[in-house]
Image (cartoon, rainbow, N blue to C red):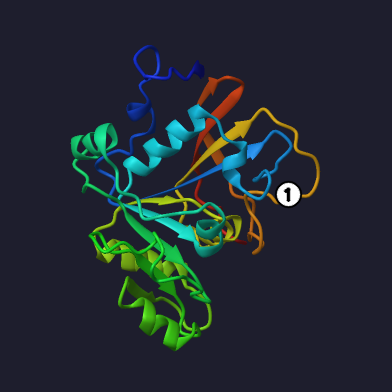
């Protein structure tokens, strides 16, 4: 099962085929993370500090195969996010897969502490989605509604099941969830995650950093079925299918 990741995907690994989601699936949620060999999810406060050229290539592919990028506000700020606008070969790839020219950016936030004039909220389409709850500041919702589509999903906290339904209602069938760990935990606990793509970096960072799942405890451990392992420069690229949770007795 171990295969080498070829930079141009021209030899023994076709990356697009390796990560493609079957067209017949009506809905699919994929989440991706990078972790050091000792479990750290960031280096100097950023997940990008752990990455490599191969990891960035796979991450770009996962984005290019998605309808919507779902991310927590804290991760978006820490990693310097902007609304994605693919160009060149990445734009051609999306069109080849029958996808719109750009994925929708969906931000999950309770406090809505965004700057409306940031790169998260471009003037062109598609508009960014902001997913929040009924207890978020009403004046912030009103301000952001001029720059994004604001979805209130849940009363006291963000209801991710309701958020998923809102994405489906908008025809956004391929979700790439980019974290952070609390959002991943909430999505796992709600039974929303179909797939985990995990890059393991050949680094030992020492104590202090968090894990890819944090916050809410899972009712039961989530089982994983390994779909493939790729390798490049010591980095491992693991693709797992998340198994349905067993019934709670």
Residue at 40% in and 71% down: 116
Identify the residue at the far bottom of this view.
138
Is 190 on the left-hand or right-hand side of 47? left
Query: Image check: 110 left or right of 14?
Result: right
Q: Is residue 153 above or below residue 18?
A: below
Q: Position of residue 123 (x, y in %)?
A: 26, 64
Which of 115/148 is in front? 115
Residue 133, relative to residue 211: is it above or below? below
Near mark 1 (Cα within 10 A), the count class, few <14, some 14-19 or many ≥20, is some
Relative vertical location of residue 152 with respect to residue 122 in this rendering, above or below: below
Question: Residue 69: percent from the left, percent from the top?
Answer: 39, 53
Any part of residue 141 in sight? yes
The residue positioned 19% from the left and 39% from the top of the image is: 95
Q: Residue furthest right?
A: 207
Name the quadrant of the C terminus. Answer: bottom right
Residue 147, percent from left and from top: 32, 72
Image coordinates of residue 122 in percent, x first then y, are 31, 61
Residue at 64 percent across and 64 percent down: it is 216
Q: Which residue is mark 1?
A: 209
């Amino acid at each position: 099962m171990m295969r080498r990741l070829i930079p141009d995907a021209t030899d023994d690994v076709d990356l697009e085929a390796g990560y493609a989601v079957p067209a017949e699936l009506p809905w699919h949620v994929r989440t991706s993370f990078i972790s050091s060999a000792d479990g750290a999810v960031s280096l100097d406060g950023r997940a990008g500090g752990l990455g490599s050229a191969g990891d960035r290539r796979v991450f770009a592919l996962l984005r290019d195969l998605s309808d919507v990028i779902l991310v927590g506000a804290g991760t978006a700020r820490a990693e310097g996010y902007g609304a994605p606008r693919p160009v060149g070969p990445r734009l051609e790839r999306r069109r080849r897969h029958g996808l719109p020219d750009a994925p929708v950016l969906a931000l999950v936030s309770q406090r809505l502490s965004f700057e409306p004039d940031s790169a998260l909220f471009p003037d062109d389409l598609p508009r960014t989605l902001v997913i929040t709850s009924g207890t978020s500041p009403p004046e912030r919702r009103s301000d952001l509604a001029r720059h994004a589509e604001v979805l209130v999903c849940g009363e006291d906290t963000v209801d991710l099941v309701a958020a998923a339904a809102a994405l489906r209602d908008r025809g956004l069938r391929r979700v790439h969830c980019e974290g952070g760990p609390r959002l991943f935990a909430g999505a796992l606990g709600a039974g929303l995650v179909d797939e985990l793509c995990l890059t393991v970096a050949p680094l030992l960072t020492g104590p202090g950093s968090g894990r890819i799942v944090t916050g809410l405890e899972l009712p039961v451990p989530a089982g994983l079925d390994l779909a493939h392992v790729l390798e490049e420069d010591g980095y491992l690229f693991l693709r797992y299918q998340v198994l349905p949770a067993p019934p709670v007795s």
